[in-house]
Amino acid sequence: MTIHQGSCHCGKIAFEVEGDFSEGLDCNCSLCRRRGGLLSFISRDAFRLNSSRDDLSMYQFNHHVLNHYFCSTCGIAPFSEGKNRDGSEMTAVNLRCMPDIDLDALKITKWDGASK
Ligand SMILES: [Zn+2]
């Protein structure tokens, strides 16, 4: 498993993720289609926030079950948090915020978030 560093654009939000990423989910929900996120759903254990939680701004919509975090300075949305159906903690990372991931090498899968 590889550790990947990630951040918002200005660096106020910094995190690292353990995992090997070969696939990105292109979500068609009303938020993702606007912000252009490319997601991977991972277990919360594989995610570590390396900046202060106080620096996270949060947005909710629709069912209000996901916390979509973004940076109040640069506006970038690096990750969201929620729960899986089994109740376990889930993080959805935006692979575009992890510079060492080769986006062109990812298999892009359509994710029908709009219907969820
Ligand atoms: Zn920022």
Image (cartoon, rainbow, N blue to C red):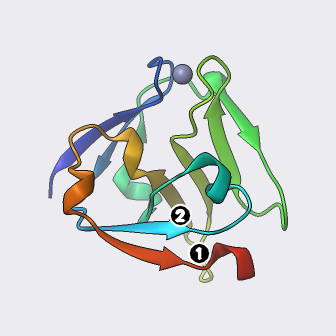
Question: Which residue is at 62% across, 22% downward?
Answer: 55
Amino acid beneath label 2: Met
Q: Earlier in the sequence, mark 2 or mark 1?
A: 1
User: Looking at the rendering, in which quadrant would you find the C terminus?
Assistant: bottom right
Secondary structure under tag 2 reads strand
- Whether the residues at callouts 2 and 1 have beta carbons within 8 Å, the answer is yes
Vertical relation: 7 (above or below) 95 = above
Disc 2 target residue: 90
| Residue appearing at x 66%, y 51% in the figure | 34
Camera sees residue 116? no
The residue to which callout 1 is attached is 84
Can you give x and y, in whole percent of width and height, for residue 86 in the image?
A: 59, 83
Ligand 1 sits in quadrant: top right
From the top left corner, tell me how far across and down residue 85 is, in percent: 63, 82
In the image, is 56 to the left or to the right of 39?
Answer: right
In the rendered structure, which amino acid carries the disc numbered 1?
Asn
In front here: 39 or 30?
A: 30
Q: Secondary structure at mark 1?
A: loop
Q: Is residue 21 left or right of residue 26?
A: left
